[in-house]
Image (cartoon, grey):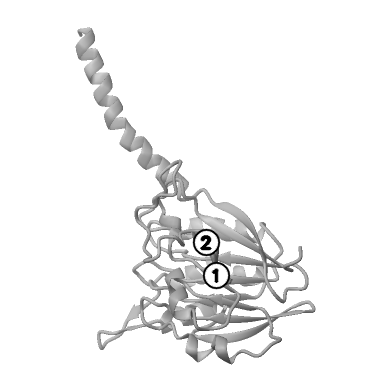
Amino acid sequence: MSLSRRNFWLSLLGTLAAPVGIYGYMRREASDFEVTHTDIPLPGIEKTITLLHLSDFHSSEDVPFELLKRAVNLAANSCDPDFVCLTGDYQTTDFPDQARFIETLAPISEIAPAYAIIGNHDFAPRPDGMVTFKPMLNLLKACRFDTLFNEKRIIKCGDQTLELYGLGDIWSGTCRPQNCLQRLDETKSPRLPRLVLSHNPDSKTVLQPYDWDLMLCGHTHGGQLKIPFTDIRPILPISDKAFSAGLYNWDQRKIFVTRGVGNQHGLRFNCRPEISVIHLQPINT
């Protein structure tokens, strides 16, 4: 074989191998969990409170129960939280096998008291052609999670007390802060620290007139694909692309967006799945 022909075939093989190698890497990264720790000073916090934030499990063929079990085990060993927050999208398209779902996720409630809301994927069809979140809400309750659907809870962490609000999903039209939150112009001081669970960070616009300190969200998956050496995430499923992943200051409040445990299509690139540990702290620390 002549040198030119040999070089041609080597070049062709290299060209064909590159996409295969990238695909294999993206498949591996989708199961390479990262445990992150984020300190968030909040008004009214007297001593550090630790919470575990998990989101976007996306139980499916692309995210099998074996992978989710590994994530739950890693989360259980990552910290000793005061409580756990789950912010939606437990399935992708098909309603999961209930027995295996409970077996896989119920151990989260053994880590600490767990509070859960739904996401835009967590619906089931009704006979009349509409959709309902009730089957998923019932499944979450079977996992011993305290489910919130536009509801409020009071949480005791030792001597510290918090208010926790869990909302419906904005894409499905079930995000109704008026059902549980006070408006800013109605709030009286002093008050307890207020945390909001809302699946999609775009819901901040609906929540702007209401009184809260920190919103925990998922939904974005961090974009699943992040161009190296940039903050470009070309497939973010949100209107405000500035809120892709991490902690943000917004309108004198804070928003934390986790990249999520699972994914869609079984692929991630430069955007590892995340188990988020959050440390609420006094402002003066």
Q: With respect to residue 189, does 262 lie above or below?
A: above
Relative placement, left or right, of 41 versus 261 is: right
Q: Where is residue 59 in the image (x, y as percent from the top left)?
A: 43, 64
Q: Extreme right residue here?
A: 159
Q: How far is mark 2 from mark 1, CA to CA?
A: 8 Å
Q: Position of residue 175 (x, y in %)?
A: 43, 82
Asked if residue 143 shows in the view, the reply is no
- Which label number is shown at residue 216? 1
| Residue at x 50% of width, y 54% of height | 273
Closer to us: 114 or 139: 114
Name the element at disc 1.
strand
Pointer 2 local density, CA inside 10 Å: few below 14, some 14–19, many at least 20: many
Kindly indicate the quadrant of the structure image that contains residue 128: bottom left
Amino acid type, label 2: Thr
Residue toward you, 142 or 222: 222
| Left-right relation of 71 to 240 | right
Residue 237 seen in the figure? yes
What residue is shown at x 76% (from left), y 63% (from top)?
A: 285
Q: Which mark is residue 258?
A: 2
- Which three-letter amino acid code belongs to the residue tagged 1? Leu
Considering depth in this image, is 56 or 198 the residue closer to the camera? Answer: 198
Q: Do the residues labelled 2 and 1 touch (CB within 8 Å)?
A: yes
Secondary structure beneath dot 2 equals loop
